[in-house]
Amino acid sequence: MSIDSPPKKSTQRFWTPEESTRLGSLWTNTEITVGQIAALLKRTERAVFRHAQKLGLPPRYTRWTPERNNTLQRLWLDGLGAKKIARRVNSTPKMVCRQAKNLGLPRRVIRKGKIADLTGKKFGRLVALALHPKRSRFGGARWLCRCDCGSVCRDQVCRAEAR
């Protein structure tokens, strides 16, 4: 910025009483998001949140009603992504994932490829019996294996193939 340039003009607008009352009425309607309220008032979301706090409006926390839980569960089990579910239940993807965990819904497993069926194959002293339901820390498949000595253990595919 050079010395001769004029000072930057502030784009801050003050809230009118009409806008404040309209914000108050829109704020209590949980069907519309803060982004939609901001668009209606031609303000930013941050400005809407700050002004709502100044007005003493309650937080926009919406409880998970049985209807919302049922919708979440149905969409989650249909395989819809967290972002799309969040739009439908008026929440955030993070809250959708948290609520899915609270409801005991299965975790989303991202698999990069098909898991080869190793059932009955022998790897050294181990024979693969069945695929274990849990994955390794890094997403690798685990198998229930039986040793020649008769004991059953859980092992990763890479370890089983290495033996």
Image (cartoon, rainbow, N blue to C red):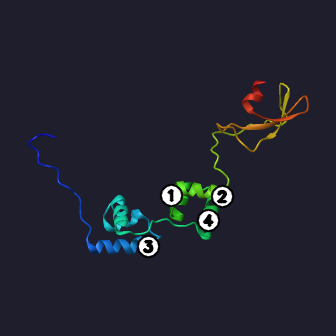
Q: Nearer the viewer, residue 122 or 58?
A: 58
Identify the disc placed on residue 69.
4
Residue 33 occupies which quadrant of the picture? bottom left
- Between the C-alphas of marks 2 and 3, the distance is 31 Å
Q: Name which of mark 3 and mark 1 comes first in the sequence.
A: 3
**41 versus 154 height, above or below:** below
Name the N-terminal-most of marks 4 and 3.
Answer: 3
Provide residue 117's location: percent of width, then percent of height.
77, 38
Apparent side of residue 7 relative to residue 90 in the rendered image (left or right): left
Give the residue drawn at x 37%, y 73%: 24
For the residues labelled 4 and 3, the Cα–Cα distance comes to 21 Å
Q: Is residue 130 above or below residue 91?
A: above
Between the C-alphas of marks 3 and 1, the distance is 18 Å
- In the picture, the disc for residue 92 is 1
Quarter of image, res 28: bottom left
State if disc 1 and disc 3 touch (CB < 8 Å).
Answer: no
Q: Would you say the residues marked 4 and 2 are in contact, meaning their CB atoms lie under 8 Å apart? A: no
Residue type at mark 2 is Leu
Distance between the alpha carbons at the discs numbered 1 and 2: 18 Å
- Residue at 31% across, 63% down: 43
Q: Is residue 50 above or below residue 162?
A: below
Q: Residue under circle 2?
A: 77
Amino acid type, mark 1:
Thr
How far apart marks 4 and 2 lie (CA) works out to: 12 Å
Amino acid at pointer 4: Asn
Q: According to the image, label 3 marks what residue?
A: 28
Give the farthest residue toward the left: 4
